[in-house]
Image (spheres, grey):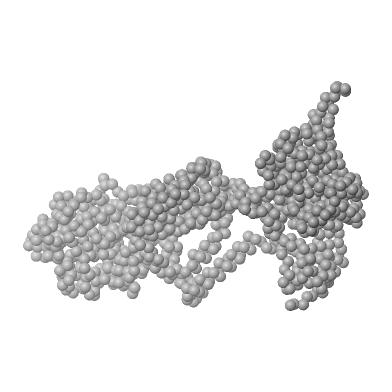
Amino acid sequence: MSYAGFKILNVFNNSPVFWVVLSLFIVSLPHLSRFPAWSVVLIIILFLWRLICIKHKNWLPPRWILVVISLSTFAAIFISFGTLIGKTAGSVLLVILLAVKLHESQSKRDYMLIISLSFFVIITNFLFSQSIPVVLFMLFAVIILVISMLSINQGDAQLSLNYKFKFSLKLLFQALPLMLVMFILFPRISGPLWQLPEDSQSAITGLSDTMSPGNISNLIQSNAVAFRVKFDDTVPQQNKLYWRALVLWYFDGRTWEQGKHNPTPLATLQTTTNENIHYTVTLEAHHRKWLYALDIPSNVPADIIYTSNYNLRSQQTINNLYQYKISSVLEYFNTSEISPWEKSAGLKIPLNSNPETLRMGKNLALQFQNKEDIVNYVLQYFNQEDFHYTLRPPLTPGFNSVDQFLFETKRGFCEHYASSFTLLMRAAGIPARIVLGFQGGTNNPLNNIMTVSNSDAHAWSEVWFKNRGWVRIDPTAAVAPQRIEQNLNAALDQAETRPLHMQINSSFLKDVLFYWDAMDNQWNLWVIGYDEKFQQKLLENIFNKKFELSEIIIIMICCLAVLLLVLAMFILKPWQKQKLEPEVKIYNDFCNKLASRGLIRAPHEGPLDFANRAKMALPEKAQTIEQITRLFTALRFEKSHHKQQYNELRDQVRRFKIAKR
Amino acid sequence: MSQNNQTEKYMSTQALFTIEQSQHLLAQTSESISSIILGKDKQIQLALSCLLADGHLLIEDLPGVGKTTLSLTLAKVFGLDFQRIQFTSDLLPSDVLGVSIFDTSTQLFTFHKGPVFTQVLLADEINRSTPKTQSSLLEAMEEKQVTQDGATRALPKPFFVIATQNPMEQVGTFPLPESQLDRFLMRINIGYPDQQAEMELLKGNNRHEMIQQLDVSITPEQLIKLQLTASNTHMSQAILDYVLSLVRSSRLSPWFISGLSPRAGLALQRCARSWAFLQGRDHVLPEDVQQVLPGVAAHRLQIHPEHQDKNIDDLIMLLIQQVPV
């Protein structure tokens, strides 16, 4: 906190309203970038207006205005999102209604309610991101929330900001062990707890299942991690790292799509080497079903579907971090015949589009006998002619995009090359298809884990050769071999404007990024990746037995109870309480004897009052009660007393017996 | 300091009554008062313990419940001078304290003592006068002296102010601020007498005549001695702890705007001592503290706006119930 900021906070230190507004603002801050503009403006106005009203109390809006704002918010959210309970829609609704609530809050109770709901807003933030910066920010928000609670409840005590800050840290520190127990033992349920309707507005950055000119080069701009790989032994060479995700068969002249299900049974592949690459992939949630594996997976876990296109699919949508172990073989061939379905799909050409390309393909088929020669010719054509590899290719609109690229613009990104190459092959009568995925990856020297990010997205082709099967041909390699050998950055022209993440030249910053990446990976593995399976494994390792869900809950409750007890002991320090005086102990015995007859002394009841009550209830014991009380008051409240009185009291109480009813 | 205390104690024990002596004197007194004010033993005891604690008394009640009679009786049984001031909005400080008048025969200013120079002063409807006049009296109460025209004159000893306030009429009144309410050791309500007492009242003679016929049972000197004895009532550590936790919990309580001040704590201690003394004990019990707490605390505590619907006496009872003995 800067000095100026601290000063401002200090001015408002004793205004609970200020703190409530500040907490609400801080917890909704990460949301604001996701919210539609109108709601951000509304929220900020509501916050500012409430702050102004601290000074001008009668400027607070009347109730009907608040009702109008609330109702129009409902309407506006429904118009913007088509739902009220989606992830973003619900968050917008929650934050705006809380901001409205600020204006009608009067009592301590109202403010405490807003603070409680602010904690809930924190949780809604985690629906969007659970990364380290977000968590750190939310930790800061929690501190502010606790300071707000202190400000609301401080009453007349003018607590200094410094004190409140330290006190809230102390409170949170006390809560830390509880948090850890809850984190470790709270039952994890596989799959989402409830199904939130998908927001129409929430766009996911990541590989999509279609390919048209421009969509991969857009994806490159993002440096978000797609998945991380830990290789068991050696890391393959950079130019062998083709991460296969999807195979696209169907082309409409502009866009490639997966098309219908490929019914071909999986053929057994022959390998030239015995070298299997073993590795573990940790996939970030991409809300799709496909999985990534090195071309080509050889050993697939049982719960993963291995499709006839040699790519992997998960049974469920990947909504959380997902880890799988897999093996691949990098050299392979297939001697069987091409299936009729693949032959027809792999040769399908969209009618009435890209006529120039089709003509060129047909000419090539006439020119060369050998199919491999055709491929080589085209690759050389890309290499020799004036083709350029660029992130910002000229637009090629319409359904003749391949023609425009091949014969006019000659500037393109991997999708342009893959697309035009595949179409040329089909025109020349060679079955061909597009493969989408990633190429390359950045090995982090700190932990030897490879990070594959969106900027490594790539598209290439596969063509069918008899006796070889589907062969990977990457036309991009012909134009910009550095893209495959090194990375995208090396392949781009010096003059090209690169995405921000590629502009980092200082080795120090690169090191920092590596550290960050390593930390992020640990966070993913230990915190976000801590799921049902992980929890079971951990408990199994500790207790050497499997646990039911209910047993975990019981263990958690017991742990919490023990912790709370320890905390209470630590805070209340009962051992510091002064010992009871002997006469009080004896008197308490006397009271307990009377309590067995239903005569319970209230904590605030003086001995005389109690004696009077007891005498009324037990007239036959009146004299003894009187004597005991007199001895006790003499010992406890009189100026001078002697040992004899004490002994007498002890004996009297010892002898005092009442028949139980 | 401690030595000083010890000598003081030694000196005072010479002048002290024994418990039996004081019981004897006080029993007569209480009896005389009870014969005039019927069915109000608790209030009489509170007023007596306030007097014994050398503090001033504020009676807040409706007209006609016996405020004046009570103060007259108190003055009479202790054989004290009595003066009464009816507070009105045009009353001036000099009407209370006295005024210096130029004497043409001596060519000097002579001070004419106001009604405040008395032993028992009844300030009737104190909230009807302006704050200026109120504060002149309240200063005299605190300092036990009057400073006028540069000369300081001591008030007689004992000096005991009984002020009355009508809680119902708010028009044309100047309610005493909290800081001045604090000068009164106790505030009590008298309330209506019960049916039996009221019947006896109707049957009985004229109260004023009865007061005139009362015997003086205690001399002012004896009263001072009794006050000394009362202040010597033993307070054990346990009771001090109890008084302190009552005061502290009033500060933590959400019902009051602010809790009891240290001065209120001292007042509570004094009153508990004289109450216990009145009960014929030489030591204070928790019950004594509980009995005097409403009288000592009610006018010093302000109910928090959020709890305006509650009664101050109920809240003090709740406070008592919150603090274990």
In this rendered view, identify the residue nearer to me: A327 or A204.
A204
Camera-side residue of A555 and B276: B276
Note whether residue A510 is visible. Answer: no
Q: Is residue A483 left or right of residue B214?
A: left
Q: Residue at x 34, y 63 (%)?
A: A287
Q: Is residue B182 above or below residue A264?
A: above
Q: Quadrant of the C terminus of chain A?
A: bottom right
Identify the residue shown where x is 61% and y is 49%. B305
Residue that appears at 49% across and 74% down: A550
Question: Can residue A449 be seen in this snapshot?
Answer: yes
Q: Please give the name of the residue rendered at 84% of the width and 57% of the height, measured from the top-left corner.
A: B279
**Outermost front residue:** B203
Quarter of the figure with residue B93? top right
Q: Quadrant of residue A266?
A: bottom left
| x then y, percent, for residue A110 | 52, 53
- The one nearer the camera, A71 or A34, is A71
**Relative to residue A472, is residue B208 drawn left or right?**
right
Total marks shown come to 0
Q: Position of residue B104 (x, y in %)?
A: 85, 22
Of B140 and B66, nearer the camera is: B66
Q: Position of residue A411 (x, y in %)?
A: 20, 51
Left-right relation of A360 to A36: left
